[in-house]
Image (cartoon, rainbow, N blue to C red):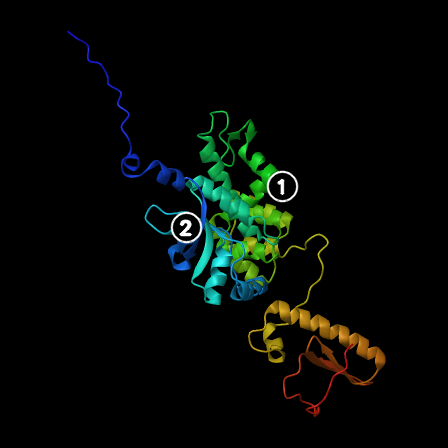
Amino acid sequence: MAKSREINMNLPSVDDLFTTQEERDQKNQEYVKDISIYEITDFPNHPFKVKMDDKMVETIESVREHGVLVPALVREKPTGGYEMISGHRRKMACEMAGRENIPCIVRNLTDDEAVIVMVDSNLQREEILPSEKAFAYKMRLEAMKRQAGRPSKENVSPVATHLRGKRSDELLGEQVGESKDTIRRYIRLTELIPEILEMVDDKKISMRPAVELSYLPKEEQAILYDTMESEACTPSHAQAIKIRKFSAEGRLNEDVLLLIMSEEKPNQVEQWKIPKNRLKKYFPSGTTQQKMEETIIKALELYRNGKKAGNDRHFDTKGEVYLLVVNEKSAFFCFPLPTPYPFGLPADYQPKRQ
């Protein structure tokens, strides 16, 4: 009986049948074109925040006056339209400036290539929040591990696999200028609930205690956050280690948290606070806490200088007028004076600059 022979037929793909070689070559090449901002969607789970801060205001004004000078980077979506890889802030600036089109480099990228390029391009920014680094490093590390293939039996670390003879977190650290331990600490931050992670961004909690707290279950993190808010305090590294230990032993509850948080910290600096509702009447509506603190410090400096002079003085600092009254019986200062100025100041009064 004759043996059946396998016939290996290399059939052309659909693209090969219905496109020319020139079209296929062009698809793999990058090119620049103006694209409507409404055809571009944001990168999925983009870890970098696009905020309306001072730099964004400057970018909007620049785009309004000169347009977008550096093209964004996008890739085509299989379902049509484009996906933003790098240029989310420029896209928002176009929206705010009333420009409907943005110049873009269109590049053919796989999902993992897109993640790596997206992270690398955004890590060039001057100011990056810990939460942004945390999710960016996690996304990039996962993409690197997928590109490297499945980990070997000898390497079962959930944070790293072997790449070019090195752990992936070690290789990533070399590429971004961080140690592998720092990379792992940042990635641990992604296990924090959003409220506590925001406290890390606001520098209310340092990296090391935050990493310890990331091992708590989400329910215990929520209780800890409520405790920090009610007691107006945050744990030190030593306290965070103790909290994690009690959690691992199944003995952590609200009473234990209060007891740990009430312990005096090493080198603890005494702090005192003024309730915000006592200060609000001195500031325009919507003034941020940082602006209030800066104004108070500035006014205290003026008070100290004015007290030495021993008389009533008015100061103008960057367009904000302060009243400082100093005499033998009392001394007080008033934060930016409203218009028209109280205390009988003439309308044509020109304050002295100090």
Per the rendering, the mark at residue 177 is: 1
Per the rendering, the mark at residue 130 is: none
Q: CB under 8 Å between callouts 2 and 1? A: no
Residue 116 in the image: x percent, y percent? 50, 42
Front-most of residues 231 and 73: 73
Q: CA distance from mark 2 to mark 1?
A: 28 Å
- Name the residue: 52% across, 63% down: 63
Q: Quadrant of the N terminus?
A: top left
Amino acid at the residue labelled 2: Glu
- Name the residue: 47% across, 43% down: 115
- Name the residue: 84% across, 78% down: 308
Residue 317 in the image: x percent, y percent? 72, 76
Residue 59 in the image: x percent, y percent? 55, 62
Tell me the residue that label 2 is attached to: 83
Residue 334 visible from this viewpoint: no
Count all numbered tags in the image, as a single digit. Answer: 2
Amino acid at the residue labelled 1: Gly
Which numbered disc, 2 or 1, marks the residue closer to the eye?
A: 2
Left or right: residue 176 versus residue 161 is right
Q: Earlier in the sequence, mark 2 or mark 1?
A: 2
Q: Quadrant of the C terminus?
A: bottom right
**Quick check: 143 above or below 77?**
above
Front-most of residues 346 and 275: 346
Front-most of residues 299 and 57: 57
